[in-house]
Amino acid sequence: MSFPKKEAATVLAWMQDQMNGDTPTKWTNGDERDRMADCADFIRALVESESAEKHIQALFNELVPASGKADTVAGEIIRAVSRIAYRNWNDGDHIGVGYGKETCNPAARYLMARAGDDVSRAVEAAWGIYGDDLYDEKVADLEEAVLSYIEQHPELKTIANSEDMRDFRNEYEDVEDYEEDEGSEEDWC
């Protein structure tokens, strides 16, 4: 089932009318208006996120091979952001946190180095966030920043790529923090 964008737009228009229309409603002022505004923001974010995900998926299908690095710079950028999003949605990995240090950090470092200032800031904003809801928002922001960068630089779809995002791994920082088990060797030494 696809996301009901048309229906969501209808609901958003109704909400705006209830909050800002000519006829006062219980959602025009106070706490009820705040709750309605929060719901509208949530629905708007879902609509925008759905659009970004679909656009990224289309670019992924166009530019990223079944395995290995992409042939173009745009393809490798899409491959990197897709890696971060996939690891979040499917495995709960976060950039700079736990196992995400191994699975996401190299892709994040590649984006920071090769995809412009706005993308770099979006990566930095997501780095080290533990909370899932906030991290989900930051990944959506990162996807939007990547799409914007590629739209501003369409030539990246034709520039040959020689780098693999996985080569941006920092061998000292991009490892999971393991907690010592009780009764480990160090306890009795």
Image: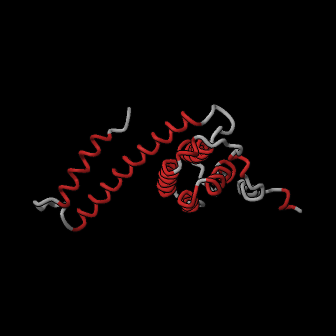
Q: Position of residue 153 (x, y in %)?
A: 53, 49
What is the residue that sits farthest to the right in this orientation?
189
The residue at the point 28 percent across, 60 percent down is 37
Where, quadrant-wise, is the N terminus in this rendering? top left
User: Going by the image, does 152 lie left or right of 12?
Assistant: right
Q: Where on the picture, by quarter, is residue 182?
A: bottom right
Q: Where on the picture, by quarter, is residue 120?
A: bottom right
The residue at the point 71 percent across, 43 percent down is 162
The residue at the point 81 percent across, 56 percent down is 184
User: Going by the image, does 85 lie left or right of 51?
Assistant: right
Residue 72 appears in the figure: yes
Where, quadrant-wise, is the C terminus in this rendering? bottom right
What is the residue that sits farthest to the left in this orientation?
23
Q: Position of residue 36 (x, y in %)?
A: 26, 58
Q: Where on the picture, by quarter, is residue 126?
A: bottom right
Residue 130 appears in the figure: no
Q: Position of residue 56 (x, y in %)?
A: 50, 42
Q: Position of residue 87 (x, y in %)?
A: 59, 45
Nearest the eye: 34 or 142: 142
Nearest the eye: 83 or 111: 111
Q: Image height check: is 27 above or below 84?
A: below
The residue at the point 66 percent across, 41 percent down is 160
User: Going by the image, does 74 lie left or right of 35?
Assistant: right
What is the residue that sits farthest to the bottom in this orientation?
30
Number of on-image labels: 0
